[in-house]
Image (tube, rainbow, N blue to C red):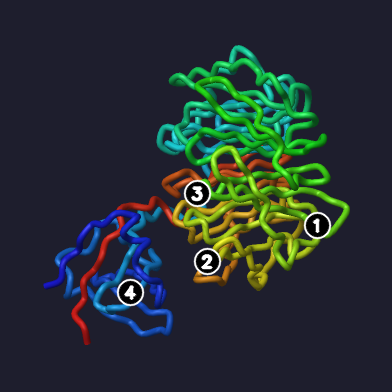
Amino acid sequence: MATITGVTLEKAQQIEDDSVILAFRTTESNLILQTKGGTQFNAGSLIDAVPVTLRQGIVSVGSFDRAPEDVLINEWNIGAANVKLANPASLPPNSGNGVAWSPDGVYLAISHVASPYLSVYKRAGDVLTKLANPSTLPAGDGNGLAWSPDGKYLAVTILAANYIVIYKRSGDTFTKLADPTTLPTGLGQGVSWSPDGQYLCVCHAGAPYVTIYKRNGDVFTKLSDPAGLPSAKAYGPAWSPDGRYLAIGYSSGDSIKFSVYKCSGDTFTRLADPASMPPGTVFCVSWSPDGQYLALSHGFSPFVSIYKRSGDVFTKLPNPASLPTGTAYGLVWSPDGLYLAVAHDVSPFITVYERTGDVFTKLLNPATLPTGIGTSTSWSPDGVYLAAAHNITPYFSAYKSAMGAIQDPVIAILPRT
């Protein structure tokens, strides 16, 4: 008899992805494993027990490693596919500009037009309840926002002076910190924390277009500007998961629409530009959890561009067969790196792709679509919930993902044949 052994996500990532499989359970509770080439293995009689969270229908993606007796199965908690959660009793008053789940998945922050400019919801199960507003509100329309990796700080860029506001969270209370001594020089756009929480990058509309702060406790000090900063309005920054790279998207008069910097302490060195550039303004950049892929949302077709990293070199992948339907403003990877959600300005307003190696395949649209232009997306850290901000009431939509919760991966040990 083979066994099922729980392993860590880190261990799972070490297994070579030589042959993608699907896993599903039959009505007789047999576990069926199917290779990418279509060969099926009935593992029902070879395992001690079928994981209770495996449900009828396709439930997972896994892989054979180089010794084909080991089959990796990510165990999913399947719910109804793409179910939109009920709207909270209290909604933002106007267009949603940004959306972000906290690192623990308990809080969902929405930046929006009109006072209070920032709305934070607390999740209990599938119910979102708006918290009391911070005692000090942002000074204008909320735009970008980002949680620190430990969930203690929430940074919000605003479309008014002082362009950035940083809150410190204690329980459900958000207290505004003193503004940095040196503020951004124009309307706040995107914002991103380094993975260690020591640096905060703010993109804005005025030169030098990018401001990087170093945090010491609750004090944020502006670093010297790196060489090779954008020459025009910057929109979206994102640190790679290992903190070694900082990508920035922007709008420039020439062909260069994004840059990647290599980070070493307080030093940021711009890498050589990729050979292929997006055709329009890059509004958002997002790294895959393993740091191997960098996705960009932008104006003009194909609206989303995905690059694969090899060392310090970024090579554009072929476009997905099915493209977003209009200008893409926001995008985010699922925590396992298998899915990419893109928010855009033409119905269906959100498009989700499934990644198989370097190929991205569009999934079915949610049964209930966002009601207007998609501006931002965020996945909860467990992969259960996907939220999108948009410009028509209810101004944001939260979905219970078809993928469900990523549980501890399991390994089904099959005999060699």
* Left-right relation of 346 to 330: right
> Contact (CB < 8 A) between labels 3 and 4?
no
Position above or below: 174 against 96: above
* Left-right relation of 416 to 351: left
Amino acid type, residue under disc 2 in the picture: Arg
Amino acid type, residue under disc 3 in the picture: Pro
Residue lying furthest left: 1
Name the residue located 40 percent from the left edge and 72 percent from the top edge: 17
Residue lying furthest right: 253
Residue picked out by circle 3: 241
Q: Residues within 10 Å of mark 4 (few under 14, many from 20)?
A: some
Label number found at residue 355? 2
> Contact (CB < 8 A) between labels 2 and 1?
no
Front residue (pair 228, 32) = 228
Question: In x, y percent, where is residue 351?
Answer: 63, 58
Name the residue located 74 percent from the left edge and 22 percent from the top edge: 162
> Contact (CB < 8 A) between labels 4 and 1?
no
Mark 3 to mark 4 CA distance (whole Å): 25 Å
Mark 3 to mark 1 CA distance (whole Å): 26 Å
Residue picked out by circle 1: 280
Front residue (pair 67, 113) = 67
Q: Nearer the viewer, mark 2 or mark 4?
A: 4
Q: Callout 4: helix, strand or loop? A: loop
